[in-house]
Amino acid sequence: MALVKHSGELLDFSEPYSTILQNVCKRVEKTFERFVRGDCNGKRSGRPRFKGNARYRTMLFDGADGAWLKFCTINGNWLFMTLPKVGLVQVRMHRPFPEGFTLKQVLVTKKADGWYVSLVLSDETIPDSIPNEIIPTWENSLGLDAVLHEDTYLATSEGEKLPSLKPLRKNEAKKGILQTKKNARRKGSRSRKKLAKREARLGLHIARSRKDFQYKTAHKLRRTGKQVFFYEKLNLQGLSKRNAPKQDESGVYLPNGQAAKSGLNKSWNDAAFGQFFSILGHIVAKTGAVAIEQNPAYTSQLLSYRDDFIFTDCSIREYWDEAEKLWVDRDINAAVNLKRVGLDLFPTLKRRRGKSPVVVSSMTHSTSKEVLTALRSIRSPRSIA
């Protein structure tokens, strides 16, 4: 038993499991360490804030044992788990357990639509996988360009445009109605809590539909049979950052374009390209392939088969090449250039302050034939019409 001085509350620490109490101290220690020292990259987080018991949603049962588990397949795949200080819990399994495993940890998480259990398993008999060394070539590689324009999610160097889902945009009106109703209720009331739960369930639906879409897109790319996937390294934090405020001499704030930028920031967050590229790396690794990020500098501006800066403005979505009698799509051209960057075939550029970049050395002629062949095989909307 322990007495809280500021409230006079008497707490019984013998009720929860010991590792759960230890995990609370570890979380606090880790939070202050990131605030004072920063993470492995030296980036510091914000000042730690107090969180109430309603926001503590995850319990960690460390030192778990296989005796905690009892399997039953009478009415489907059900698992009966004995948790310390809790008792017998019935859990529905979504995948079978491997043979010969050892249970290490049990993580119980409360979400808006119920409780979820994550099990950490270990098997010493499984050898460490050593990935095969893959030499990227023009045939076994694929360039991926992240597109945030209309209904396109990704553009590939093979000329395919993958559609986007936009789950947040589709449920934005429904979410706004729930938030308006919730804010009209009195804080702490039963009706406000019910609306908050409905809002949380909608948020789960948005996140899960986005993740499901990203997994399906990653598997579609995996089925292309490519061994190397080159995608652009995006500064997502900078792309979704608010514009700096502007003030005149009298201190009055001037328009800084933040109203238009807010919609763009929401679109970047809705697309979640960082999460997608992480999922893509895990999916293709299962088949022995790799996903490698590349620097996208000037890949969206330079023509992929000739060293000309054509797409200098984001409003230029297509380009008609009179010499080649060819329509060139901006996004597919950028995907081809990302593939060239990965294969070390992109030209070396030099830029002085205030001047346009200049091509110092180039190997564009070595792949121009392959690029033109790929671009001519694409049926653009203009050619169909």
Image: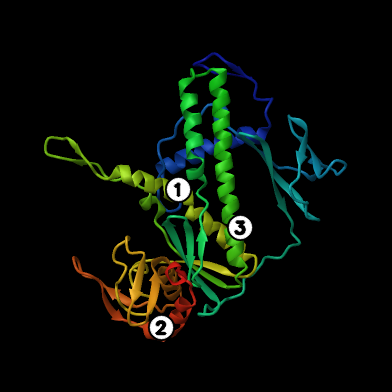
User: As displayed, is residue 19 above or below residue 350?
Assistant: above
Seen as rendered, the residue at the extreme right is 74
Residue 245 image point, x, y percent: 24, 41
Asked if marks 1 and 2 touch (Cβ < 8 Å), the reply is: no
Q: State left or right for residue 7 relative to residue 105.
A: left
Label 3 sits on residue = 216
- Looking at the picture, tell me which residue is in the foreground, 363 or 263: 263
The amino acid sitting under disc 2 is: Ser
The residue at the point 65 percent across, 65 percent down is 286
Image spot of residue 12 (x, y percent): 65, 21
Task: Report the residue at 50% width, 80% height from top.
Answer: 138
**Which quarter shows the N terminus?**
top right
**Above or below for 307 versus 298:** below
**Quadrant where the image shows the C terminus:** bottom left
Going by the numbered disc 1, the residue's amino acid type is: Asn
First reached walking from the N terminus: tag 1 or tag 2: 1
Residue at label 1? 269
Q: Residue at coordinates 37% horizontally, 52% vertically from top-left? A: 239
* Residue 335 image position (x, y, % from top left): 44, 69
Label 3: few (<14), some or many (≥20) within 10 Å?
Answer: few
Upstream in sequence: badge 3 or badge 1:
3
Q: Which of 240/171 is in front? A: 171
Q: Does residue 233 sit above or below 109 in this rendering?
A: below
Element marked by disc 1: helix
